[in-house]
Amino acid sequence: MAKINPNYKKLPQTYLFSEIARKTKAFSEANSGVEILRLGIGNTTLELVPEVIKGLKRAVEKLANVRTYSGYGDEQGDIRLRSELVNWYKKSGVALNEQEIFISDGAKPDAANISSIFDQKSIVAIADPVYPVYLDANIIGGKKIIFLEADEKNNFIPKPPKQKVDLIFLCSPNNPTGAVANKKDLLQFVNYAIKQKSVIIFDAAYSEYITDNSLPKSIYQIPGAKKCAVELQSFSKSAGFTGVRLGWTVVPKQLVVEGKGDVNRTWNRRQTTMFNGASNIAQEGGFAILSSKGRKQTLKQVRYYMENAKLIKKGLESIGLKVTGGENAPYLWVKCPKGLTSWQFFDKLLTQAHVVSTPGVGFGKMGEGYLRFSSFGHRENVMKAVESIKKYLKL
Amino acid sequence: MAKINPNYKKLPQTYLFSEIARKTKAFSEANSGVEILRLGIGNTTLELVPEVIKGLKRAVEKLANVRTYSGYGDEQGDIRLRSELVNWYKKSGVALNEQEIFISDGAKPDAANISSIFDQKSIVAIADPVYPVYLDANIIGGKKIIFLEADEKNNFIPKPPKQKVDLIFLCSPNNPTGAVANKKDLLQFVNYAIKQKSVIIFDAAYSEYITDNSLPKSIYQIPGAKKCAVELQSFSKSAGFTGVRLGWTVVPKQLVVEGKGDVNRTWNRRQTTMFNGASNIAQEGGFAILSSKGRKQTLKQVRYYMENAKLIKKGLESIGLKVTGGENAPYLWVKCPKGLTSWQFFDKLLTQAHVVSTPGVGFGKMGEGYLRFSSFGHRENVMKAVESIKKYLKL
């Protein structure tokens, strides 16, 4: 008699974004003709840049011709793309080799799957608030979880745990707070991990939004990190690949848990067994992103979104709201005024200003009393939303 | 202190295809100038058909324009594609709805991940010989495994287990044997599963190679199957999408383990948490495959590979080898002559005829004494390989 994995019953019943969608839909249906202004979901809105389109078309053309057609590629990803990523890291002073990079269909699946290569009895430390996938995937995997609280007092950057843990999930620039760990912050985690022989899973999917050059874009800019950290990365937010699906995970050979190169070898075994490579079309697109033209064009889009962030920040601050983030990250973290809960302020913004945001409490209990604003969106809509908040929101 | 998931240590050390690659490389290096003829790996070789190329280009063009650009789609897949699949099943007399179909990046990841939604203490029955992913993924997942033996005596179609099991993995048309279960065979499994409340995972990735219309292409053609079976499918072999990556999994709502619609709901939770949708470009390609022009063009390619299968079968039989499969499947299952083991006959074929095959023992102990031949390849190469075997192989 088959049974469902009982861990699924431990998951929260509703998912943050479906609840937002439900509330938005209900409001919209009850107020027909009202334009809903969305600053909620972190979904890219700009078209792909010309150089990347060229790359994608080249990939399709290759598949159209029997002489250049290719089927299965390496599960670890096209070696040319991995080589380009080695060069990309080199520019940040990080030396890696191709066997330490695993191309994937995005950071989300890798973030969700990485824990499965470690002992089920692992104790996992997860920041709060944070992207819900780390928590959910570790609940499904039957891991024991502790939270690393992040709030105003520590500038929304958690500190290493006091107790012993086996795995630590960090996300910087952070989703949802937009806070970015500096080198000293990360060094504390690296030192902790080396001492406790724990492994840091560092989600750097938003690194291209860092404008302050003193802030680390990769955990491998921190001495010792190769011995204790896995890094997740993605083309989703830096190049608009949210729908095209392409990312990668770095597992250094120096990262040892029980014996020489074992984490790298186990992830390799996991991926060759349970994954079959990212789409070859997407990979050709990734190759184009990393070209000098591709980089120039995609970074321009990142700056566009960061301009949005500035406009939102300025607008919200002008009416007295307290806003952090949005300077080295596409997310703004807004404190709910007058002790409102996240959902109360969410409702107020929706019903008064017709603006959809994301309740901070959806990212963990420490997110209660905050909203996340996303800077992904068309300038015109962002401005409309900001104006609507300034005009109609009654604080 | 982090530890590696101990189940990884239970996996076989070497992977079938890497061992083949190693042997082939060693022979090639020791015999420079010799042309290696490959009938080993099941990798498509024909270019994508014009209609699909058009679809892929349309997808890229959409992404190039800010008005038609799209980011994240539904994790379950584009609703238009799911609707087309509902129509596709309807033609085989199978009624499904869109919420029962989950688009993925291929059948391999789904085959590897599906067990994780069931209790870790599940007992899993896996055919032997079979595609290694089911076994490896269930070992990694810590499941208890029993084997359903398939050999000459049962025409390489396993029978339901004598003992109680919770999950059953079946693959028909089978990889590696090329055997296809008929309706009676499958009905036995469905009856068993309903009686024992077990779940069948039915891998139908090669269904388009079935030419005999009396053979079931979907397990849902068997009465009762919706109550007990999940079906895995793929565009890899039917449309050359091995590198583009697109497949789907059917989880009927009628399939109940503990309560109404629970398997469907749990797989939905798994996919929305741990997956982020297949590439939107690939999905537009999938949509084109299912159009009437797309179907006509891709089925022509399937016939091309099946012609290869006929040529291989005829050639091998002409020198007295015993061959099954290859009539409703792209794989041929060849009995090693004179009691040779799989690897002995593999070596003989490689060194004497320079032909690469796949040792049957790599698919399980019941595969010992067999080789798998794949009909994926260019006609010219297939013919060259067959001629080389006829001319140089000393039996």
Image (spheres, coloured by chain):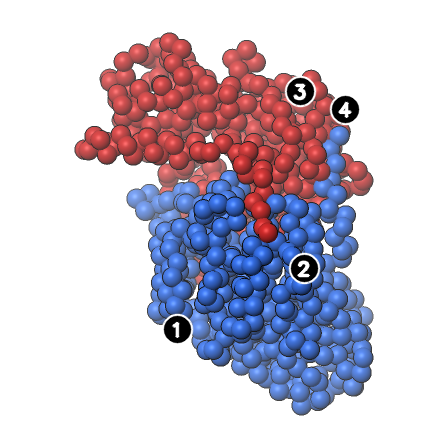
Chain colours: A red, B blue
Q: Chain of mark 3?
A: A
Residue B53 as seen in the image, left or right of residue B44 = left
Q: Is residue B288 above or below residue A4?
A: below
Q: Amino acid at mark 3?
A: Pro
Q: Which mark is residue B296?
A: 1
Where is residue B28 drawn, in percent x and y? 75, 70
Rendered image: mark on residue A195: 4
Under circle 4, the secondary element is helix
Q: Disc 4 marks which amino acid?
A: Lys
A66 or B17: nearer the eye? Answer: B17
For the residues bearing labels 3 and 2, Cβ distance under 8 angstroms:
no
Q: Nearer the viewer, mark 3 or mark 2?
A: 2
Q: Secondary structure at mark 1?
A: helix
Return the residue at label 3.
A161
In the picture of the structure, the residue carrying the numbered disc 2 is: B163
**Residue at horizontal 62 percent and vertical 38 percent from the top:** A141
**CA–CA distance in space, label 4 to label 3:** 12 Å
On whether disc 3 and disc 1 are found on a single subunit, the reply is no
Question: Foreground: A94 or B137?
Answer: B137
Q: Are marks 4 and 2 on the same chain?
A: no
Front: mark 2 or 1: 2
Q: Report the amino acid beneath label 2.
A: Gln
Q: How much space separates mark 2 and mark 1, taking CA atoms?
A: 44 Å
- State whether residue A140 is above or below residue A341: below
Task: Depth check: give the residue in front, A168 or A329.
Answer: A168
Whether residue A376 is visible: no
Query: Circle 3 — which element?
Result: loop
Labelled pair 4, 3 in contact (Cβ < 8 Å): no
Q: Is residue B271 above or below residue B358?
A: above
